[in-house]
Amino acid sequence: QKEVEQNSGPLSVPEGAIASLNCTYSDRGSQSFFWYRQYSGKSPELIMSIYSNGDKEDGRFTAQLNKASQYVSLLIRDSQPSDSATYLCAAPILTGGGNKLTFGTGTQLKVEL
Amino acid sequence: EAQVTQNPRYLITVTGKKLTVTCSQNMNHEYMSWYRQDPGLGLRQIYYSMNVEVTDKGDVPEGYKVSRKEKRNFPLILESPSPNQTSLYFCASSLSSNTGELFFGEGSRLTVL
């Protein structure tokens, strides 16, 4: 099992719809989770962090965390073409050298007109 | 402006010719890290540094060296590059190793012929 797992996509949604991106993680002890957005040819950019079970909203973005089920999701409401990007989930995973921030391989989102 | 600066942004070189990719941050961050990104494999950590003179291996350190003589700089050295080191490289920094809130440089695309 990968430590942080995401569907690679592409996930296609029409403009104005809700895009739902999911991520599962292997380390039950992980306490913090991060969503990065990466446009094609650009560097990753942090868009959301979540530390507690439940929902965290920031504008059109909502991060949802369920520690019991070991998954974290990102909802994008009223999706826009400018949201088309790859979304990377990250979590600290306990390794022999301590907690290491580990990235999933990312989900490609395409918002279609 | 807070930023992480990498140079060069693009480089084509030949097998065995030593090269250095520089990374500098102006945010007084303690933690710095190098990643490589390859299609289907996501972001993989090469080396990281918790502070000046403190460095450690990440997931894929073979063929790379780093140094952290000053807080702001964290160069990545390829002593004898090989074609399997052709990749997109990112430098990132954060306030400390305890946060997953990384700031990424713009990336360096390296091709080894």
Image (cartoon, coloured by chain):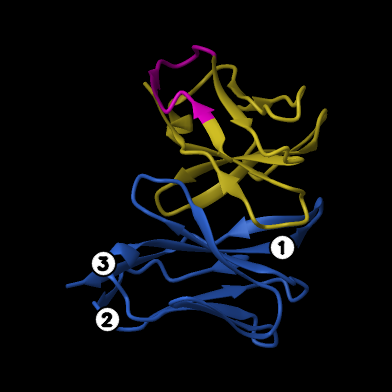
Chain colours: A blue, B yellow
Task: Looking at the image, tell me whether mark 2 or mark 3 is earlier in sequence order.
Answer: 2
Instruction: Please name the residue shown 58% across and 41% down the image.
Output: B2
What amino acid is found at the position of numbered circle 1 in the picture?
Ile
What amino acid is found at the position of numbered circle 2 in the picture?
Gly
- In-front residue for pair B56/B30: B30
Alpha carbon of mark 2 to alpha carbon of mark 1: how far?
35 Å
Q: Quadrant of residue A19?
A: bottom left
Mark 2 closeness class: few <14, some 14–19, many ≥20 residues within 10 Å: some
Mark 3 closeness class: few <14, some 14–19, many ≥20 residues within 10 Å: some
Q: Chain of mark 1?
A: A
Q: Quadrant of residue B67?
A: top right
Instruction: Please name the residue shown 64% across and 69% down the image.
Output: A33
> Do marks 3 and 1 both belong to one polypeptide chain?
yes
Identify the element where label 3 is drawn.
Answer: helix
In the displayed structure image, the side of residue A31 where residue B62 appears, left or right:
left
Q: Farthest residue toward the top?
A: B17
> Do marks 2 and 1 both belong to one polypeptide chain?
yes
Q: Which mark is on residue A93?
A: 1
Question: Considering the image in quadrants, where does the C terminus of chain A appear?
Answer: bottom left
Q: Which mark is on residue A81?
A: 3
User: Which region shows up in magenta?
Assistant: B6-18
What amino acid is found at the position of numbered circle 3 in the picture?
Pro
In the displayed structure image, the side of residue A35 where residue A13 appears, left or right:
left
In the displayed structure image, the side of residue B54 where residue A92 appears, left or right:
left
- In-front residue for pair A59/A23: A59
Q: Farthest residue toward the left?
A: A113
Which residue is denoted by mark 2 in the rendering? A16
Which dot, 2 or 1, sits closer to the camera?
Answer: 2
